[in-house]
């Protein structure tokens, strides 16, 4: 098997900048075929673990969270050695995937506002952290692997990073942001339409007069089939979709942690973006090494179309 572990130089670069990549995973033609086959499976949420999540406007986008638990292609995707080897070279040999999310951006959609995430409590409707690192840990957050399932150009709304910004949290996640669906697509910041799916990250700023230094921002242009790795604590955002093409930009984010981190330790439901769904069927997926801690629920996910079984 080919070894995709990061070199020492790449590891140092990641810790300096907070991200590394992009890397090739699929050829554009291959990813286009995969996406064509994937679309009808995503529309069928019958087996999605949050398929019955309800919100103020009916079924919410929670239905497309964690689809690696019921869609074979996504289950295989999160375990690809091109991804897992690189992630384990940063987190150590024992690694789990605890969440996946789709990030579509349609023509004319606003950009995603600058934000950071350490324990992911800020959009959960409570002050309970979704992930808890051991008290003696040097850092928190999660590693995100963001894959471009379509082309991600500046005009179509590619990611933006501020290199090195992962070392300092500018937001207080003990606060709770107020969800307002009516604000989606209507918030302008410094002349750019930027929002956060109905939330306003300014409500969490430690310093209300602070604003990100966008002069240091870098655009992460990616071709279809590439992926990039970054800390969730890195200041990141995305450009608006300029609407110059009718094509949607689709990103798929998989989030990874070492197995000693506790996942949803205080919650029995996932509450985000105006919706709520039970965590009864939730489980982490062990993608590398062993689970020696036994404090997280895991699923035994096999890529054969059979229902998963809760293993812990």
Image: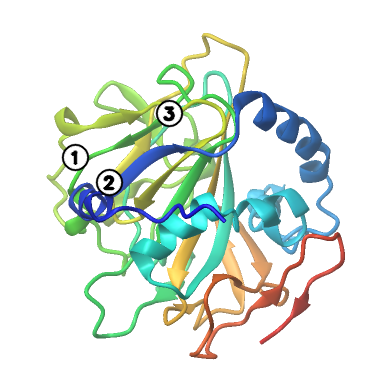
Residue 292 on image: x %, y %: 50, 89
In this view, the residue in front, 61 or 143, is 143
Residue 150: where, in percent of width, then height? 59, 28
Mark yes or no: residue 55 visible.
Answer: no
Q: Which mark is residue 254?
A: none
- Label 1, on which residue? 212
The quadrant of the rendering that contains the C terminus is bottom right
Q: Are marks 1 and 2 in contact (CB under 8 Å)?
A: yes
To which residue does mark 3 refer?
A: 158
* Mark carried by residue 235: 2
Q: Is residue 139 left or right of residue 147?
A: left
Earlier in the chain: of badge 3 and badge 1, it is 3
* Residue at 25% across, 70% down: 139
Relative to 184, is 59 on the left or the right? Answer: right
Residue situated in front as seen by the camera: 94 or 18: 94
Q: Quick check: 59 above or below 40?
A: below
Furthest toward the top, the residue is 244
**CA distance for labels 1 and 2:** 8 Å
Residue 179 point in image, percent of width and height? 48, 51
**Which residue shows up at 68% across the image and 54% down it?**
76
**Residue nearest the observer in this picture, 181 or 16:** 16
């Amino acid at each position: 098997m080919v070894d995709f572990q990061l070199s020492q130089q790449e590891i140092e670069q990641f810790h300096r900048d907070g991200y590394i990549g992009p890397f090739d995973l699929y050829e554009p033609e291959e990813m286009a075929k995969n996406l064509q086959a994937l679309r009808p499976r995503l529309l069928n949420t019958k087996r999605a673990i949050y398929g019955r999540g309800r919100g103020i406007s009916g079924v919410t986008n929670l239905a497309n969270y964690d689809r690696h638990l019921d869609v074979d292609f996504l289950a295989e995707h999160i375990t690809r050695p091109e991804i897992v080897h690189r992630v384990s070279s940063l987190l150590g040999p024992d690694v789990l995937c605890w969440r996946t999310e789709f990030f579509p951006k349609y023509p004319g959609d606003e950009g995603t506002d600058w934000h950071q995430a350490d324990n992911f409590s800020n959009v959960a409707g409570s002050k309970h952290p979704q992930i808890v690192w051991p008290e003696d840990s040097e850092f928190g957050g999660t590693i995100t692997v963001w894959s471009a399932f379509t082309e991600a150009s500046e005009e179509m709304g590619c990611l933006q990073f501020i290199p090195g910004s992962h070392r300092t949290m500018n937001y207080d996640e003990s606060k709770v942001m107020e969800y307002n669906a009516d604000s989606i697509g209507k918030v302008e910041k410094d002349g750019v339409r930027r929002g956060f799916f109905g939330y306003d990250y300014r409500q969490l700023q430690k310093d209300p007069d602070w604003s990100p230094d966008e002069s240091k921002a870098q655009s992460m242009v990616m071709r279809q089939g590439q992926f990039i790795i970054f800390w969730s604590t890195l200041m990141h955002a995305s450009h608006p979709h300029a609407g110059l093409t009718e094509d949607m930009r689709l990103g798929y984010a998989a989030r990874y942690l070492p197995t000693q981190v506790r996942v949803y330790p205080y919650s029995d439901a996932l509450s985000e973006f105006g919706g709520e769904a039970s965590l009864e069927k939730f489980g982490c997926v062990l993608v590398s090494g062993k689970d020696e801690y036994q404090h997280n629920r895991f699923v035994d996910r096999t890529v054969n179309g059979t229902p998963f079984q809760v293993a812990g």
